[in-house]
Amino acid sequence: MEKPFLKKHYQETVLPELLKSRGYKNVQQVPKIEKIVINSGFNAEVERSYPEEVVKEISSITGQKALVTRARKSVSNFKVREGMPLGVKVTLRGTRMYDFLFRLIAVALPAIRDFQGVPSKLDGNGNYSLGVTDHSIFPEVNTDTKSKTLGLDITIVTTADTDDEARELLKLMGIPFRKRSQTTQQQTTPSNN
């Protein structure tokens, strides 16, 4: 079986580049992508068949069977009972993770209208989370039969210790981070009045 494109890219291009730029002494110190977690939440008061539809959609997007997450305890204010389905999640590792990331970068993100790049803010622990408001940007979704749009939370978990290392890793992997806007650059430079 052939290696996924992004895994080969990581080993041949990203790894040597990070070794050189960051001055790591060992290949094991170089940060890498550990897993990608995709989840989608929905209202507790949906019809019974809806969670299965969401599982089918996310499974087709990721190539792996999704898991229904259920409420751990009842909360009367939110009309939630213990055991009610509240969302769907899937954790990708290995080949499926690299394949999904490649499709996200090369196909899905460019399909967003007026796409300017994704925000470059990380969580402080070297992990990157991205919200997608419409899952129909993925080519696996049949938009003719779909009535509701799903929102997805995509979290890329890395082994990086700092946000800087993780940002450089993700940038080299091909994540299209948004460039700083002209207005913020103008505000930071002093005026010559």
Image (spheres, rainbow, N blue to C red):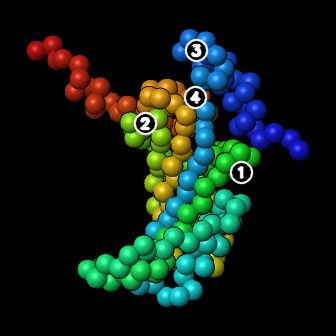
**Quarter holding the C terminus?**
top left
User: Where residue 165 appears, x then y in whole percent?
Assistant: 49, 26
Give the mark nearest the N terminus, 4 or 3: 3
- Residue 118 position, x and y percent, is 46, 43
Question: CA gap, disc 1 to disc 3?
Answer: 28 Å
Whichever of callouts 2 and 3 sits on the residue coming sooner in the sequence is: 3
Q: Which mark is residue 125?
A: 2
- Of badges 1 and 3, the one in the foreground is 3
Identify the disc placed on residue 31: 4
Amino acid at pointer 2: Asn
80 vs 62, left or right, is: left
Please name the residue that numbered disc 1 is placed on.
96
Which residue type does callout 1 highlight? Arg
* Mark 1–mark 4 distance (CA, rounded to whole Å): 19 Å
The mark found on residue 24 in the picture is 3
Residue 72 in which image quadrant: bottom left
Q: Nearer the viewer, residue 172 or 87?
A: 87
* Residue 134 visible to an observer of this rendering: no
- Disc 2 and disc 3 in contact, CB within 8 angstroms: no
